[in-house]
Structures are given as structure tokens and as C-alpha cells.
Image: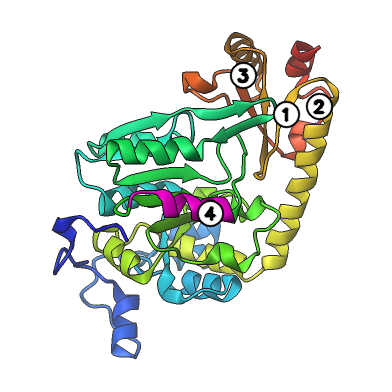
Amino acid sequence: MPRFPQHLTGSGPTNPFPGIKVLERRLGREIPHRLGSNEGLDMPHRALREHFGDALAEHVYCYGDAEALGIRQRLAEQRGMPLEQLLVDAGADSLIALALRGLVSPGETVVTTAGTYPTFGYFAQGQGLDLHEVAYREAPGVLAPDLEALIAAAHDTQARLVYLANPDNPSGHLHDDEAIRTLRARLPEECWLLLDEAYHDFRDDAEAPELNQALPGVVRLRTLSKAHGLAGLRVGYAIAEAETLALLMKVRIHYAVSTLSQAAAEVVLDHPEEVAAHIAAVKVRRERLAEHFRALGAEVLPSATNFIGIRLADAELAERVNRQLLEAGRLIARPGHPALGQLLRITAVEDALAPGRLGILERALR
């Protein structure tokens, strides 16, 4: 098991503002008179009510539940996992920042794949960490994070943390559960594995019980931004051993997830059939999109996400196509890292399948 940073062990910092929901649970009763709260509880919110309605206005007065118990209870029941192995924060990005803040000290080394989700590197460098990147494994029809290279780099650099997006962004590649467990077993004992599973819900085996297990030395990150459609409200969750999450709670921004975000997430989680229907529709569109571009001779990479990746002949062509599409009001994604300059990423929304919508790309492939 990797060790925790010394300044966070022992008594360490504690959350000075647990919030009224947490206090009520500790007391075992409701606190009806909030005479010590400074959140503007008597603000009439006439304009807000007129614009959005009374139901929304009722969610804006108070800070959210610092422990997001309602979301965690629903996830625990649906995913079949212990409540104490779940932590909710303001999306996967905030969870990445939280993991780095809580598990790695400034000056230590973290390892990732060159060109994978760039927010990880952004946060790592901002925290004063030594960012070490390894190349993707490339072959015809393959663009995958190289697990062997990550393992070797972790040992060579005495890394404190390895980051892996699985399924990967932007390639869409998926490593199976056995590969992930093998990766964890072969990393240095004191090295954490930060497993970013933001696109987990779109993999075909997403409901497998073993994929919801907390693994020693691993922090799994998930989000309600993709399959649940709540990107604008910023809700994500981590799965890890209770001891690890208890330490992360010491340095978490305690009211990062608003009362409104929590209420909306609970409503969506209470209707899993709607989420399941959305996931199924995305998968159909993803395959239609992939088949369409394969028929045009494009190299479409396998994807377990809500997008497809198309690898063009070179970075210059990809840059030109991307620029022309943007000038025509069609925003797709091209990774900023030079190692992946030839890749274009297209989200499997209905608009992408509209005839002629991606005509600029289609003509470039002919």
C-alpha cells in the first residue's frame, strides 16, 4: 500500500465547516433554526424565482451536504459497494486535483501517457510535481496507453503516482480488468494508481461487479458528466479504500458540490432507466459513425467511450481539416499534444450523423 504524505497523517488538517447536514446526522435530529449561518437565508430571490421557478430557488440558500450522502447512498445501492468507499466532488477534474493534492508532495514524480487527458498534466505541473510522460503504443488500428512503459517509468523515476485514463481519452482504447490489476501489482509498492474512468459507463461490461471494487493503492474516478448529462453541474465520484478517502476528505474543498447539483444528481440517479437508454443510444450512434468513416477508408480506432477517434495520415492534414471545420462552425476535437497531432475526435451525437455535417472531413478522406 502506498504511503500518505507525512503532513496529512496523524491529526492532520480537519474540515472546519462540516455543514448543517453533517451536523444534523451527528446529532441525530433536525436543526430547524439556522441562526449562525451567513448564507443569506432571508434573501427573497424574486428575480431568481421568476426566471427559474420556486423549486430551483429553494436549493440556492444553503451550502450543499459536504458528504453528499444522498448521491453516495444511491451510487452505493446501484453499484453494490460500501458507502465509505465513495467520495463525491465537483467532477472528475476536481477529483484529479484532489488526488494530487492529497497523495503526492511537491517535487515528487508522477507518470502519465504523452497526449492523454491533458488536465492531469496541467494540475500536476501547477502543484510543482515532476511530470514524466511515456509514448502511446501504436500499431495499425491501435493507439493505446503503454502499460509496460508506464510500469518501467514508475520504477525508473521512483514515481509516487501513475495516471491512466481507462477508457482512454482521446484514443478510446480500453484495458480490461485483468490488465488493470496486473498494472497495479507491478507498480512500485509506494506508487499510487490514479485510474480515470470518466467514460466507464460506455464500456460493454460497465455493470460487472469487479469493476466497482476499491483496490489497494488505487483511486478510481468517475463522473456524472457523460452518461448522466450533468457536465454543467459538476458532479463526480471516487472509489477507493475508506482510509484513502478519509485522508482525501481532509484536503477536499468541502462545499465544492452545490446544493442544486446534488439535488439534480439525485433525481437523475433515481431514474437509471433514462441513463441506460441514453447509453444505448450513444453506442448505436458511435457504431454508425465509425462504420460511416470506415467505409470512406478512414482509420477509425476502437472506442469504449461516447466518441470515435480517427487517425489521419499526418498532423498537417489533421490540423487543416480541424481548422476548416471550425471555420465552418463545426467543432470537433484535435489533441494539443504534438504526439497525437494526427488524431481527430468526434463525439457520437445525432448532429454528427447529419448528412454533410462533416463533409470537409469526408472530402479530405477521398
Q: Nearer the viewer, residue 103 or 354?
A: 103
Say whether residue 179 is magenta. yes
| Residue identifier under label 4 | 51
- The residue type indicated by label 3 comes to Leu
Q: Which residue is denoted by mark 1 in the rendering?
A: 300
Q: Which residue is mark 3?
A: 326
| Residue 332 makes an appearance in the image | no
**In the visual, does 178 lie left or right of 296?**
left
Tell me the CA gap for discs 1 and 4.
45 Å
Kindly report the distance in space between the C-alpha atoms of the residues bearing marks 3 and 2.
Answer: 23 Å
Q: Amino acid at mark 1?
A: Val
Q: Which residues are magenta?
A: 178-188
> Do the residues bearing badges 2 and 1 touch, measured as CB atoms within 8 Å?
yes
The local secondary structure at tag 1 comes to strand
SS class, disc 2: helix
Q: Specify which label sits upstream in the sequence, 3 or 1.
A: 1
Nearest to the observer: residue 76 or residue 213: 213
What residue sits right under mark 2 in the picture? 294
Q: Secondary structure at mark 3?
A: helix
CB under 8 Å between discs 4 and 3: no
In this view, the residue farthest toward the bottom is 28
Q: Residue at x 14, y 68 (%)?
A: 10
